[in-house]
Image: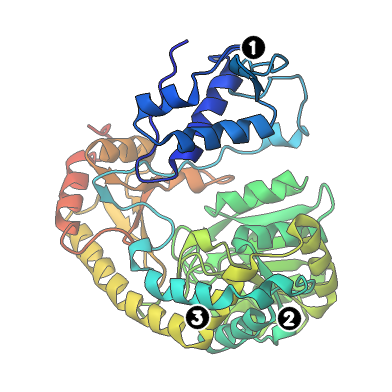
Amino acid sequence: MDLYLDPDTTGNRSATIYRELLEAILDGRLAAGERVPPSRELASSLGVARGTVTTAYDRLTAEGFLVTRVGAGTFVCADIEPRRARRAPVGDLRPRQVWSALPAPVPDAAPTEFDLSVGGPDTTLFPLAVWRRLVSATLRPSLLTASAYEGGGHPGLQAEVARYAGLARSVVASPDDVLLTNGAQQALDVVARAVLDPGDVVVVEDPGYTAAARLFASHGATVRPVRVDEEGLVVDDLPRAARMVYVTPSHQFPTGAVMSLRRRIALLEWASRRNVVIVEDDYDSEFRFEDRPLAPLQNLDRDGRVVYVGSFSKTLMPSLRVGYLIAPRSLQDTLRQAKLLTDWQGDAVTQGALARFMGEGLLSAHVRKVTKLYARRRQALLDGLATLPHGVLEVLPSAAGLHVCTYFTDRTVDDVAVAAAAAKAGVALEPVSVRFQGTTPRPGLAMGFRRITVEQVPEAVARLASVLPAPGQAPT
């Protein structure tokens, strides 16, 4: 057969030739027993040194894919069976039944010209040069010989998290109280493993963070959505059988409501009477633009009911995959065991670099810097929304976070269709109705300001206005 290779001229040509020959063998384009081109001939056709090709041939020979016959040439091994497809076989194995009953995940918004999607931070603001320095300083021979962190993670980062959470959020914790995880989602998974039995009732906010609800349901829990109003989770609606309550009290997702002090106290008292675990997800309250934050539930907890979950996905970058949880001492040993069962330990290099980043005061400085930038973007978005036709969208109050939430005053509007029309107009945003799980969905739009510049906001709002329907009308 004719074999065409296009080696990467900027990389390792020998490695590229090796990969493409291997793919040709595995795909059957080079059949078992077939002679491959002589090294001199292939090198000439590719314009590379003969040694480049012979290095690739030698590697394939050492791995058993090629065999050399003196005086005859180099051939594909006769016992090589090409793979029939590039995917694993279908099979008839079936997952646990619970997976077929899980609600569908909310899809991420597709990339558009104007990004008002809800999610992580503006990753272009990440201090990459500083991070490279810290990673280099962490990646030392001593790291390679250090014993695995069998407790809560990197000890230095545990100490920095305890200090930072105490100063920034009034969380009460010592370094030993901190369990480091691979993001907040793993923290929720670890808590579920440690606390929940199949069939246990877990309360989630409605509307709310549907990925958490899916996770709890995957553990066999019975998920009960409870409505949210302007004061946060409605405690009077909590089911008597609840074993766990998952809340986002500092900046409710997606509405942005702050749980009132009255509600916080009522929730803690209710949980204490019924021996219920409260999982407090403080996912983005570092970014505050108005008012002073209320003390977290964890700070108000006197009976050891609250597991506090945080992460660095919003403050720095989601791909760092560093989160943490701070739990009552009665749960800490079990939570550590559950964490060890999932992945043994986190990324020591990333955790060590983050410990240095925080220890040098760089995290606090970064948060202050980007909060000022996000504040300008947020105000530009609010000013833009104020120019929309009166009575179409109600902007919900919000003093923190990286998005704002709106409801349509006309509850018959199809917000999913509006979001799709906005995407066609070049504006990415999220319909709110997809975040409801129990109560009647209310249509609305959640809009982030993490990835849009102040200068882009007017045009983005103008395009949104062009697809907003009048009450009772379908979007164009």
Identified by mark 2, the residue type is: Asp
| Residue at the spot of label 2 | 177
Give SS at disc 1. loop
Residue under the point 64% across and 83% down:
156
Tell me if mark 2 has few (under 14), some (14-19) or many (20+) residues whose alpha carbon lies within 10 angstroms of its own: some
Q: Given contact means CB atoms under 8 Å apart, are the residues at marks 1 and 2 in contact? A: no
| Residue at the spot of label 3 | 357
| Residue at the spot of label 1 | 33
Give whichever of 388, 446 is nearer the camera. 446
**Residue 216 visible in image:** yes
Quarter of the picture holding the C terminus: top left
Residue under the point 64% across and 11% down:
33
**Is 377 located above or below residue 86 in the figure?**
below
Give whichever of 75, 438 is nearer the camera. 75
Tell me if mark 1 has few (under 14), some (14-19) or many (20+) residues whose alpha carbon lies within 10 angstroms of its own: some
Please provide percent x and percent y for residue 400.
41, 72
Q: State which tag comes first along the sequence, 2 or 3.
A: 2
Identified by mark 1, the residue type is: Gly
Please provide percent x and percent y for residue 349.
60, 69
Quadrant in which residue 381 is drawn = bottom left
Give SS at disc 3. helix
Q: State which tag comes first along the sequence, 1 or 2.
A: 1
Give SS at disc 2. helix
